[in-house]
Amino acid sequence: MRWQGGRRGGNIEDRRGMSAAGVGGIGLGGVVLALIGYFVFGIDPSTTMSVVNGAGGQQAQQQDGVRGTTQDQGGQFVDVIEQSTTDVWTQIFAAEGQRYRRPAAIVIYDQATGTGCGMGQSAMGPFYCPADQKVYLDLAFWQELESRFGAKGEAARAYVIAHEIGHHVQNLTGATRQVERGSRGVDSSAVRLELQADCYAGVWVAHAPAASGGQVSLDPADIEDGIRAAAAVGDDAIQKQAQGRVMPDAFTHGTSEQRMRWFRIGVEKGDPAACDTFRAGRL
């Protein structure tokens, strides 16, 4: 995919090399992050809680990393993609007479870090924390995306970032509040939220070339890489890989087919209104 000539927004908070800080017991934050781990990549909450305990059993404190752009290519890629999503969503919101507020930061970290939702762990995968409006990403996840999920290439990575930015858009529009506590299952509000974020990632793909003056774009082969990444993190694929069987009642993100289809809808329609999974009769 094309991105190296893209504009960098400097909305990166680089915490790599910093140790995780915390005080007290595991607290509500650890529980929230355990649920994020489950909702994002199907990780058993008890596994996440043990990881949090392994980090010192502490409730996270906020940390301040180095703000701005980075010198390494991995950080620059994240910077360019975040800026591109900002350009796209700023235009979309403006067309509706609204103002888009970009995430407070994309936090790049190693292994563990404090967040507004508790102690963040790389084992949870990339995630968005509504409490501080930041996206958290350990760049080591890119290797896991390839080795564990078989999703290769920069387009697959861009899809992941755009999906998390989609959760930020949902936070701004209020869609996040439509998710019922403990929601799971094939027709659950949790699944509908995640499929909408997939669709929003596709909307970004559709608008990125025009919004960036052609500096950020995905060709048809790149889009297929993004679709394969969406399929790789389907509930059915992850459950079958982890447990050898599929449990639809435990779905929180949707099947591989659903995630591919809603991402493709976003790409083809380029219209957030087409992403209303909460009213869709068929997911």
Image: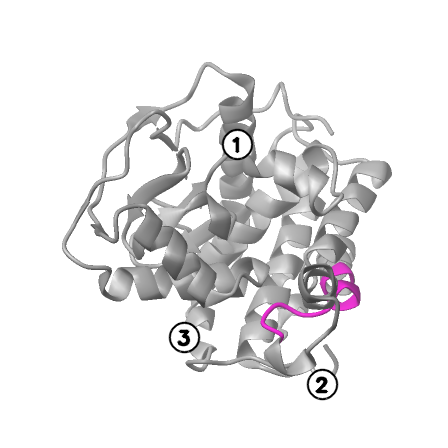
Q: Would residue 101 be found to the left or right of residue 205 on screen?
A: left
- Which residue is the site of mark 3? 177
- Residue at image coords 71%, 26%: 2
Numbered badge on residue 78? 1
Q: Secondary structure at mark 3?
A: helix
- Residue at image coords 59%, 24%: 6
State the residue lying farthest toward the top. 71
Residue type at tag 3: Arg
- Which residue is the site of mark 2? 281
Q: Secondary structure at mark 1?
A: helix
Q: Which residues are magenta?
A: 251-260
Counting from the top left corner in percent of width and height, residue 111 is at 41, 38
- Residue at image coords 63%, 52%: 201
- Residue at image coords 34%, 49%: 54
Colouring method of the image: one colour
Residue type at tag 2: Gly
Q: Earlier in the sequence, mark 1 or mark 3?
A: 1
Q: Quadrant of residue 77?
A: top right
User: Residue 140: within the magenta?
Assistant: no
Residue type at tag 1: Val
In the picture shown, does residue 202 fall above or below 80? below
Counting from the top left corner in percent of width and height, residue 243 is at 68, 66
Q: Quarter holding the N terminus?
A: top right
